[in-house]
Structures are given as C-alpha cells and as structure tokens.
Image (tube, grey):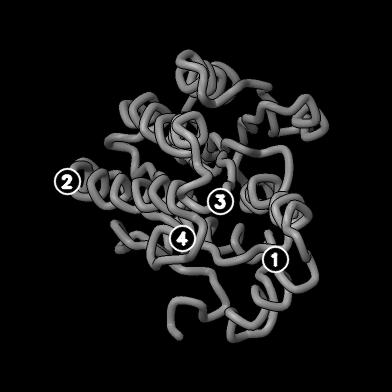
Amino acid sequence: MDLTAVVTGAARGIGRSVVTRLREAGYRVVAVDISPSVAELAADGIVPLQADVSAAEAPQAAVDRAVEAFGRLDLLVNNAARFLRRPILDTTDADFDNLFAVNVRPAFRFARAALPHLTGTAGCIVNVASISGLVGIANQSVYAMTKGAIVQLTRQLAIEYAGRGVRVNAVAPGAVDTEFMAEARAADADPAASLAVTLGNHPIGRMSTADEVARAIAFLAAPESAGITGTILSVDGGYVAR
C-alpha cells in the first residue's frame, strides 16, 4: 500500500533530502515551502505546495492536498525553521516573535491538522529539533528555546497518542552542511574562524549531510521503528556526547 507524507521546509537542505528519501521508500509526498522553488520538486508522486507555514490556513491546506491527491496521510515531517545566532541583549521582541511564529506554532498547527488522519493508521510524526534544544549554546537563546519547544512537543504528543497508534519522534541535528548553515555562517564576522569552531565541536570532525539527517527521519518513520516513540535522535557527529 502506498503511503503519503507531508514535509514542510521541503525546497532545499534537509527538507529536500527528506522528500528524496521518502519518495525512494515509496511514499507519495506533499512538499510544502514558502519558496517558489518548491515547484521544482514536481514529479510523479510529489505534489509541491507553495505556502507560508506560519499562515493559519497552511496546515489544513497541506493535509487536504495530501488527502485529495493521494487519498490518505501517514506521515508528517515538521522541518521548516529559521535560525538566529544573536546575543540576548541584541535580540528584539520581533526576533522572538518571528522565530516562534515559524519554528514552533506551525509544528503545533500541522500536527493538530494531521493527527485525525494519522490516528488508527499507524501514522507517524517526525519533528526536526536541534542540539540547540538539548544543550546550551552561546548566542542562541531564542532559537534554542524554539527547538526546546519542539523537543517537548514531541514527547507530549508521543504520550498523548501512543494508545491511538501514532508514533511521534524527533531528530536533533548538529551542524549540517546546507545552504541554511552557509547563509548563517556568512553573517559571522569571521566565517572561517566560525567554521573551525563548529568543526572542532563535532567529534567526527565534520558537519553532517542533509541526507544523513533525512535517513534518520526515514528510519524513524519506517515499520522497523514500530517500537520507538517519544525519542529524540541526535544526528550530531557526537556533539552532545562530549
């Protein structure tokens, strides 16, 4: 039986790799992103949906598109997010509100929209958290708060829906070699020095790839993971084990 997934933040980076991995695993995918480039993903079994995940109507629109196009929904991957590295004294109320509006509220809303379709069908939710939601990292106060919220949302939904056949897990990436990371590093005063610090903090001596994170997400969604729920799987090159 063909399975169907909704993936947010799907146009590039981790999200795009997730779409590729899930399609290879046989999923039909609704790929959601604010960027017009999401249209490039259009293919057999992949329906792109250009939408701002922070818009109130976006979650239901994505779920409806999955059901209309493919007749069912089995998996939600909450991946869309923004990053902010800034000392707290330089962080504004607008920074705070904007990050929570993109990183947290949509994950809640998409889960709320998806869960009625996932209940009783061995459905899954996989959220993309971060090591920033697990350990303290300087100058990431608001970003870390948003990812900590994703960690706790994952645990709460896992407990609430375990008896209804829905598994909810999260991955917590460290630094990942994506455009997302490159853009954040380009804003640093000394990008080369910043990169050296990042690599030094990851025991494997490199950043993870988007595909490595996508593989972890696909694993958590797979039937082989039927006994796993409420887990935060770090894909961080050993960062939190230091």
Question: From the viewer's perspective, is 164 left or right of 147?
Answer: left
Along the line of sight, which residue is nearer the eye, 88 or 29? Answer: 88
Question: From the viewer's perspective, is 42 left or right of 134?
Answer: right
Residue 169, horizontal then vertical, whole percent: 37, 54
Residue 150, horizontal then vertical, whole percent: 38, 47
Instruction: Check disc 2 and report the residue beneath it.
Output: 163
For the residue marked with disc 3, what is the amino acid? Arg
Q: Earlier in the sequence, mark 2 or mark 3?
A: 3
Residue 75 seen by the camera? yes
Say which mark, if any, is on residue 209.
1
Q: Earlier in the sequence, mark 2 or mark 1?
A: 2
Q: Are marks 2 and 1 in contact (CB under 8 Å)?
A: no
- CA separation, marks 2 and 3? 41 Å
Q: Say few, some or many: other residues with alpha carbon within 10 Å of mark 2 (under 14 / 14 to 19 / 20 or more).
A: few
Q: Are marks 3 and 4 in contact (CB under 8 Å)?
A: no
Residue 224, horizontal then vertical, whole percent: 42, 64
Total residue callouts: 4
